[in-house]
Image (tube, grey):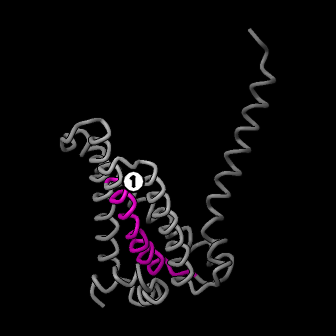
Amino acid sequence: MTILDVLYGLIFQPQGTMRELARTRPLLAGFLVFIGVYFANYLLQEASSAISQNGLGLPGYASWLLASLGAVTAVVIWFVSAGLFSLLAEIIYGYGNGKAVLSCLGFAVFPGILGPALYYAAILLDLPGVGALLYLLSGLWVIGLQVLAVREALTLTTGQAVLIYLLPMASFLLIGALLLIIGGLALSSLPLL
């Protein structure tokens, strides 16, 4: 299966394509797609911002430095997410496959390139509201593909994959809420000066 077949399959036959990616685990290709989508999105967002601010220049040096730092951060988050999803599946369901999850999640971001591209086109047509809606729909498509990636890579049911996908976010939200409550209680018990 060539990279073009995979990219075509992600749009028109995502389930079968994710199943094949989970079986073959092409990590390098997944990494290249992930990084390519990241930098393409960065350029499109910079172009959209420039048009919104009535300028058409390319991003400067500092901006590229920030983009590179963002790319490193995105790759770290990609690796941690894949490891966390695999670990949670192994703890809860007794089976993990980190390499397959990593590969599938790398490809799952591909439709995310459509959001900034369509937003840029909408900005050119002076339809920013339509562009924002298309951007949102693109993001939801990526989330759906990420859940499908977890499902196919770990051979789970859809409900189990959604649980594995949402559990880290729910945990972070719960811990954050508890820390806010504890901090608020601690601050409320301090004497006023």
Which residue is situated farthest in the top direction here? Answer: 193
Query: Residue 83: x percent and y percent?
Result: 51, 69
Classify 141 as above or below 120: below
Q: Is residue 104 left or right of residue 84?
A: left
Q: Residue at x 40, y 60 (%)?
A: 115
Which quadrant does the C terminus fall into?
top right
Instruction: Specify whether residue 98 is painted magenta.
Output: yes
**Quadrant of the rendered image containing residue 104:** bottom left
Which amino acid type is marked by label 1? Thr
Identify the secondary structure beneath mark 1.
helix
Classify 79 as above or below 128: below
Q: Residue at x 62, y 58 (%)?
A: 169
Q: Magenta span covers which residues?
A: 96-120
Q: Residue at x 60, y 84 (%)?
A: 95
Query: Residue 183: x percent and y percent?
Result: 72, 33
Q: Residue at x 29, y 53 (%)?
A: 44
Q: Which residue is mark 1?
A: 73
